[in-house]
Structure formats: C-alpha cells, structure tokens
C-alpha cells in the first residue's frame, strides 16, 4: 500500500500540474505583479488613496492626458497649477468639474498636488495628427506672436505661464476661444489681446502646432 502511495502521489501531482499548471503560473505572475505595483504605488505618493487618483480619470496616469479635451498636467509649472486650483476653488475660473473638486482641497493638498505634477515627466501627444498646412501656419503665427517670451523657448512654461507644448488640441482651442470671448482671463491681459487678434482659423492653426509639439522638460 505504501508503495502504491509513493508512486500514486507524484502521478497525481504531475496530472494536476498538467491540467492546472498554466493557471497556477498565471496566479504566481499575478501575485508578483500586484506586489510590484503596490510597491510602486506607495513609492509614488504614500498609502492609498492618493489625492492624484481623482485626477487620473480626466488628466491621465501621472498627468499625461489621453483626451484632446483635457489638459496634461505633467510638467506644468507648480506655481501655475497652484494658482489655477485656487482660481477654481474661488470661482475666478469656472469649470463644473474642477470647481467643486478644488473647493474640497486644503492649501497643503493643492501645493502638494501642484508639485507632484510639476515633477512628472510629460509625454508627446501621440494621438493627435495635425493637418500639415495648418500646423505650418500655426508655427509661423506662434513665432510672430512671440509666445516664447512668456512660455519659454520650448513652450514648456515657467512660473505663472503654462506649458503649451503637447497639450490637447481641443483644450488649447477652447482656451484661445475663452480668452478671445473674455470668458477666461489672466492678470496681464496679453492672452485676451492676442486671442482676439487671431481669427478662428488662426486659433485652429496655433492649436494644431502646439498640440503636435514634443514636450521637453526644461
């Protein structure tokens, strides 16, 4: 009997591995993935939940939006992000999603969030394919408008001037239109003046060029 058990048990194990081996290997790999992902999550911002988790839905993982209508936050200057969140909270800048969210945040949370996204690495807006003629026109208009004077040589922004390079086309166009109409404002008044000086087609061209730029951290 003992002899049969010694032979039978290994055979059963072999049969079980043959039938369920791939599933067991999958579970082992899943466990490894969960462990690695958890460690990375904790290293990225401490225990769950992160304040940034809410932002991911619209602004993408680590602030790199996959939607042309939502801005990428990665690589945006921290002072600019902080100011905009305060503007949303105080309704100086209006948005049905950002307003209520910003109102729930404390000053330290706003500062921490701004610093987190400012330190994130921006990626190219690879889902936008511009019309080349429109893009070239936009490039000339950006040069003529001397956008680099405020937004930096790479159009990555600094201080209170936002990153423009690689932002979503729809978002950029919407902001130009809002500045032109007076719906959105900024302290210098430059954006309103510039936007009003451009035709709707000019704004589309500028948005096409900027959305297609590869963002490079300064």
Image (spheres, helix red, strand yellow):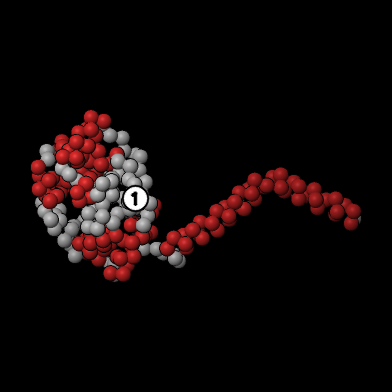
Q: Is residue 98 visible?
A: no
Which quadrant would the N terminus be assigned to in this image?
bottom right
**Residue 187 on image: x %, y %:** 13, 58
> Within 10 angstroms of label 1, few (less than 14), some, or many (20 or more) residues?
some
Q: Please give the name of the residue rendered at 31% of the width and 69% of the height, measured from the top-left corner.
A: 108
Name the residue tied to disc 1. Answer: 217
In this view, the residue farthest toward the top is 133
Count of picture labels: 1
- Judge whether 155 appears above or below 51 on screen: above
**Residue 124 on image: x %, y %:** 35, 43
Judged left or right of residue 27, residue 82 is left
Q: Place residue 52 in its image quadrant.
A: bottom left
**Which one is in front, 60 or 214?**
214
Q: Is residue 165 visible?
A: yes
Judged left or right of residue 117, residue 192 is left
- Judge whether 163 appears above or below 131 on screen: below
**Which one is in front, 22 or 64?**
64
**Which one is in front, 128 or 21?**
128
Say what secondary structure mark 1 lies in. loop
- Judge whether 93 appears above or below 136 on screen: below
Q: Place residue 113 in its image quadrant.
A: bottom left
Judged left or right of residue 47, residue 214 is left
Q: Please give the name of the residue rendered at 9% of the width and 44% of the height, measured from the top-left corner.
A: 196
Q: Please give the name of the residue rendered at 36% of the width and 63% of the height, measured from the top-left corner.
A: 51
**Residue 168 on image: x %, y %:** 28, 44
């Amino acid at each position: 009997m003992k002899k049969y058990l010694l032979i039978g048990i290994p055979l059963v194990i072999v049969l079980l591995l043959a039938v369920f081996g791939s599933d067991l290997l999958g579970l082992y790999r899943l466990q490894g993935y969960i462990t690695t992902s958890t460690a990375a999550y904790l290293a990225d911002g401490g225990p769950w939940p992160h304040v940034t988790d809410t932002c991911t839905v619209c602004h993408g993982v680590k602030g790199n939006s996959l939607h042309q209508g939502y801005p990428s936050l990665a690589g945006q200057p921290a002072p600019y992000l902080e100011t905009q969140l305060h503007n949303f909270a105080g309704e100086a800048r209006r948005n049905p999603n950002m307003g209520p969210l910003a109102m729930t945040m404390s000053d330290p949370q706003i500062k921490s969030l701004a610093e987190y996204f400012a330190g994130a690495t921006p990626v190219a807006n690879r889902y936008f394919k511009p019309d080349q003629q429109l893009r070239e026109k936009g490039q000339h208009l950006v040069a003529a408008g001397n956008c680099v004077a405020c937004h930096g040589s790479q159009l990555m922004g600094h201080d209170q001037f936002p990153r423009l390079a690689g932002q979503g086309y729809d978002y950029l166009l919407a902001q130009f239109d809002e500045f032109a109409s007076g719906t959105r404002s900024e302290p210098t008044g430059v954006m309103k003046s510039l936007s009003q000086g451009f035709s709707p087609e000019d704004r589309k061209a500028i948005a096409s060029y900027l959305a297609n730029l590869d963002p490079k951290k300064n």
